[in-house]
Amino acid sequence: MAKNINIKAIDFKNLPYQSRLVQLGMGAVIIVVIVILAYLFIYSDSSERINQLKQEEETLKESYVDKSAKAANLDKLKAELDQINGLFQVLLKQLPTTAEIPNLLQELHECASKNGLAMESITPAPAIHTNSADGQGQQVIETLPYNITITGDYNQITQFVRDIGKLSRIVTINSIVLNRNGKDDKFTLVAVANTYKALNDNEIQGQSAKK
């Protein structure tokens, strides 16, 4: 049976002259120390680097899956974009040109007259410009607001608003204020009728020159 080794009793200066059991024990201790140091200074750094590379691998896999899905839907997205651009061009054609504005105002008067309403006033307000991107670049849309005041009964006014929505050109009614007249059952509608037009290149350059 092996005897216990008393490390304190070992004379390290005379280690070569110690018993073989002592030498083997010390060799084993040295090997263990070397392995621990190797783990601390080499393996631990490698392990950390491996974990970092695994995380990068997962990130790259997720990016690849995401990009693959987008690439698979690219043709579909292009088709949808072409469809949206086509609808946008159709809407642009529904915007009145400068020459059509007087006719549009006449249509507003006709809508009021057809429904038995009295068009008290219709006055233009300052135009508003908005940049809108289409498939062919930037398109400047000009909002042309008109302050309108009409008088009639409630049903006539509601039908007037419905008829505005059926015009061939886009017209919206905003900032509606409806007041009941004290003398009779009539109502007075004060609102802003907005129509829109797409500016051509010459008009855009003229607006830029004014600014």
Image: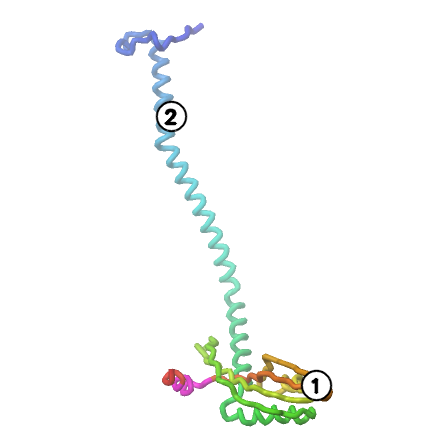
Judged from the image, the secondary structure of the residue bearing numbered disc 1 is loop
Closest to the observer, 114 or 204: 114
Q: Main secondary structure of the magenta part?
A: helix
Task: Identify the residue shown where x is 35% and y is 27%.
Answer: 37
Local crowd size for mark 1, using a 10 Å CA cut-off: few (<14), some (14–19), many (≥20):
few
Local crowd size for mark 2, using a 10 Å CA cut-off: few (<14), some (14–19), many (≥20):
few
Residue 140 is covered by the magenta coloring: no
Q: Earlier in the sequence, mark 1 or mark 2?
A: 2
Q: Is residue 45 left or right of residue 158?
A: left
Residue 76 locus on image (x, y percent): 54, 68
The residue under label 1 is which amino acid type?
Gly
The residue under label 2 is which amino acid type?
Ile
Which image quadrant is residue 54 in?
Answer: top left
**Label 1 – label 2 distance at C-alpha:** 99 Å
Q: Which quadrant of the figure contains the C terminus?
A: bottom left
Query: Can you name the residue that lies furthest to the left here?
Result: 13
What residue is pinned by disc 1? 182
Task: Identify the residue shown where x is 69% and y is 89%.
Answer: 152
Judged from the image, the secondary structure of the residue bearing numbered disc 2 is helix
Q: Is residue 16 left or right of residue 187?
A: left
Closest to the observer, 134 or 95: 95
Which image quadrant is residue 109 in?
Answer: bottom right
Q: Which residues are magenta?
A: 199-206
Task: Identify the residue shown where x is 62% and y is 80%.
Answer: 176
Residue 175 locus on image (x, y percent): 59, 79
When the figure is inspected, residue 203 is found, relative to residue 19, above or below; the finding is below
Residue 64 locus on image (x, y percent): 47, 54
What residue is pinned by disc 2? 36
